[in-house]
Image (cartoon, rainbow, N blue to C red):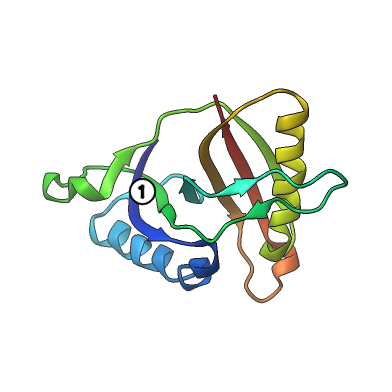
Amino acid sequence: MTVLFHSYQTTLGELGKYAGTVVKELYQYVVDLDLLVCGPQYWFYYGVDARPPAAGGGPPIIGDSRFTLEIALPVQGKIPTALLPYFKQIPSFKCLSNRYQGAWQGLSGQYGEMVRHIKDNGLNMNGMCCESYLHVDFAAPENNITEIQIGLL
């Protein structure tokens, strides 16, 4: 898919400052450039330091190291060549995916279950994770619907 995106070097602890702000900017670009949005917002995480939980369960162990975050909107339309650094093609990728409904604070538990499944089945992660925000509700976060995708080799 073709996406309009912004890229950041950040940590998991800093993610809150991007929620609800960057996507507004991307939508403004979509309007200004007369593009068509063709899907939900995506957050791509490259190189996040997460390890599977210890035996007995619990969420994955998350580090505070910096990683690359790309916040993206899938778009269609005539893309101005002067703005090409803000657009790119996201190729399809093999992944384990799962839908999660609820407040984003619960995502780490869902990731823990998914990472456990990956390890239990002898699969290997490729260093990329993606969250697709299918429904965002800041007023009632229990209504959020997020698709989590963990890239696999």
SS at circle 1: strand
Q: Quadrant of the C terminus?
A: top right
Q: Nearer the viewer, residue 80 or 9?
A: 9
Residue at image position (74%, 49%) is 110
Q: Amino acid at mark 1?
A: Leu
Residue at image position (15%, 47%) is 80
Left or right, 44 with reference to 98: left
Left or right, 20 with reference to 34: right
Res. 3 image quadrant: top left
Residue 104, percent across and down? 67, 63
Residue lying farthest to the front in this orientation: 54
Residue lying farthest to the left in this orientation: 82
Residue 21, percent across and down? 43, 71
Residue at image position (52%, 49%) is 48
Residue at image position (64%, 68%) is 137
Q: Is residue 13 above or below residue 53?
A: below
Which residue lies under the disc numbered 1? 36
Number of residues whose C-alpha sits closer than 10 Å to that of mark 1, classed few (under 14), some (14–19) or many (20 or more): some
Residue 149, percent across and down? 60, 40
Q: Nearer the viewer, residue 111 or 33?
A: 111
